[in-house]
Amino acid sequence: MTQSSTPRVAVGLPVYNGENYLRIAIESVLAQTYRDFELIICDNVSTDSTPAICAAYAERDSRVRYHRNPRNLGAAPNFNMTFKLISPSVEYFRWISHDDTMSPDSLEKSVRALDAHPERVLCTSLIGMIDADGTQTSVYDSGLQAARNSDQPSERFFDTALRKHNNYDTYGLIRRSALENSLMMPSYYAGEKTTLVELSVRGKFFHIPEVLFSVREHAQRATSAISRLNWLSNEDTSASRWLQIGTLMMFLDYCRIVNRHVKAPAERLRCYRMLVQWWFRHSHAAEFASDAVAFVSPKAYLALQSLKHRLVGTERRAHA
């Protein structure tokens, strides 16, 4: 397949040791009915058959561009690298993980929606939850109605930052201009939520009530397998240790987002009030205390986590 020299869409696929489902993810991208795209694969120095798989697809289809990092950057920087490598002509961008899939008409319907609504920064859809074998087990809707409908940045900020939801909308089709000059995806735990919050402050979302993207739940999925304590070492191999206090770093980034993008004084004040509320929602204050304990004494943190797991069960997903 010959790649357009000026693709309008880029799909970023960050991967590390993804041989288990990588071919399925790539095939789902290449099967798109919308053809004017490039697929950027960034390999974080995989040690399995990932490099051979990627190289074979790049040789077979000119729309596939394979980049292997000189060292393991960590997961979040590798996500960001896929965006840094897109062509100058690209107008829309989206991520896909190596174990997820896109429906064949995903790009076509999403591009059509953003073309028709130039004020929207992100096109989302229903999410199919699939198991290790690819069987759909449920359908997820983030339910972020204010992010989709409100003209007030503060209401969109509240919807994405303070309401409880998985962050799968991050995998929608994003207007390139909304990601440029942004914080991108930070390296702290659940940093993809910060990406989504910044997008919501910059503009409204468009939602397609169809399953256009599927997230695979399996035992080896990174967000299921990595604890908060180990998140930083897996996410960014060169990051400051301060990022281990992810709850504080997220709060500070939310402040930066409000300062940078919310210009109206009344709207900015509403966002600040919401930031105070944020500490008392969804156990953020408790998570900050937990992060602080881990920062000072990992052994004490592990002891507390062991006690918690015995009392209330396993840790929540990073996306929650």
Image (cartoon, rainbow, N blue to C red):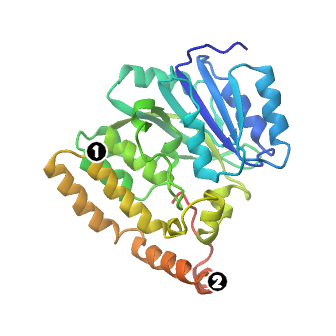
Residue to which mark 2 is pinned: 306
Q: From the viewer's perspective, is 200 left or right of 78?
A: left
Secondary-structure class at tag 2: helix
Q: Nearer the viewer, mark 2 or mark 1?
A: 1
Residue 142 placed where, x, y %? 45, 48
Q: Which mark is residue 281?
A: none
The reply to whether residue 128 is in sight is: no
Where residue 304 sits, quadrant-wise, is bottom right
Taking depth in this image into account, of 70 and 49 the one nearest to the observer is 70
Question: Gap in Å between the C-alphas at discs 2 and 1?
Answer: 41 Å
Name the amino acid type tagged 2. Answer: Ser
Secondary-structure class at tag 1: helix
Q: From the viewer's perspective, is 115 left or right of 76?
A: left
| 226 versus 57 height, above or below | below
| 36 versus 129 height, above or below | above
Residue 284 placed where, x, y %? 41, 70
Q: Which mark is residue 261?
A: 1
Q: From the viewer's perspective, is 48 left or right of 254?
A: right
The reply to whether residue 279 is in sight is: yes
Residue depicted at x 58% and y 24%: 105
Residue depicted at x 75% and y 49%: 132
